[in-house]
Amino acid sequence: MLLFALFASSLLYGTIRSHASGWTGSGTLIAFGVCAVALLAFVLRQRATDHPMFDLALLRRPAFTAALVAMFVGEFTAYGFMAYTSIWLQSLTGLSPLGAGLIMLPSSAASMIVSLLAGRRLHRFLPRYSLPVALLLVAVGALAQAGLTPGSTGSRVIAGLFVSGLGMGMVFPVATTLAIESVPHRRAGMAAGAFTTFQQLGYAVGVAIFASVMAAVAKSELTGHVTDAHATAQELTGGGAQAITARAPVTARPALEHLLSAAFVHGLNTVAVIGAALAAVTALITGFVLRRETWAAADYAEPDNEETNALVNT
């Protein structure tokens, strides 16, 4: 548990650290070095013990691995850059926190409604169909949020958020059931824990990586227009647009506001396209991996040891 926590925390810290010191900075490289060593130690420890926290052999099951990857990518894409959409709505379009929340509400509402009303019905379909379709909806929703301009308002992203929410509402029940039913019954708790971990990691890693992309794009847009493009980009993507504008002379503020808005939406458009591409590719790979899988739990409920397997086969 400690080794995995060290791996995850150093991975996120290294990604966040890259915003300030770059991907080749000493702090970033040290964090990623610790991440790699912790992951290796975790794998070796799990393979050496008779009672692992996570049985690595489960990853050899295509259905289980596909469920983990689908959940990770879904969270990464659908919710990874949502934090920056919220920042954009509040710091650059002038919405209040409540107003920004209402703009983003359709995503949560769509996800909840689909999960509650359609979850059981989705189980009737083979995962090789339903899971790729869900990820494609996430991709379409992310792509629909691209194309922002400095004059765009919050209403421009509502449709994309809604479609992404529909996709995640399908991913949750399908991937959860697939992950649990694709392992022996005695490993169901372990599978559920791994699935939840990948879900949280997908969101956390998405936020960290998209922050780095946002800052890099904003810096590129601001270079040559402001004194310290790096520091300004960091402050801008952290929600400091109004503070940056307040420090400028009154006569220069309209032009600066337009520049900051253009830099921020360019970053949002970039991460939206990246997320959409990742979700679409994952949908295709998931469909290919699951092409021979079935949805029935009986097909996954294998005996727990080789001797029982041999007896059953006989």
Image (cartoon, grey):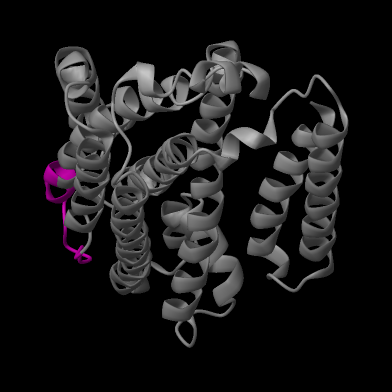
Measured along the vertical axis of the image, is residue 169 above or below residue 83? Answer: above
Magenta-drawn segment: 147-159
Q: Is residue 153 left or right of residue 208?
A: left
Residue 153 in the magenta stretch? The answer is yes
Measured along the vertical axis of the image, is residue 37 above or below residue 183? Answer: below
Total labels drawn: 0
Residue 154 seen:
no
Residue most toward the bottom?
224
Residue 52 in the magenta stretch? The answer is no
Q: Residue at x 18, y 27 (%)?
A: 110
Q: Residue at x 17, y 30 (%)?
A: 106
Viewer-side residue, 263 vs 285: 285
Residue 157 seen:
yes
Q: At which x and y percent is residue 99? A: 23, 31
Location of the N terminus by quadrant is: top right
Q: Is residue 134 left or right of residue 202?
A: left
Q: At which x and y percent is residue 201? A: 56, 38
Q: Is residue 82 left or right of residue 202?
A: left
Viewer-side residue, 6 vs 44: 44
Q: At which x and y percent is residue 71? A: 42, 37
Residue most toward the front?
314
Q: Which quarter of the figure has residue 36?
A: bottom right
Q: At which x and y percent is residue 299? A: 37, 23
Viewer-side residue, 281 vs 143: 281
Measured along the vertical axis of the image, is residue 151 above or below residue 50? Answer: below
Q: Residue at x 54, y 35 (%)?
A: 198
Q: Which quarter of the figure has residue 80?
A: top left
Viewer-side residue, 194 vs 64: 64
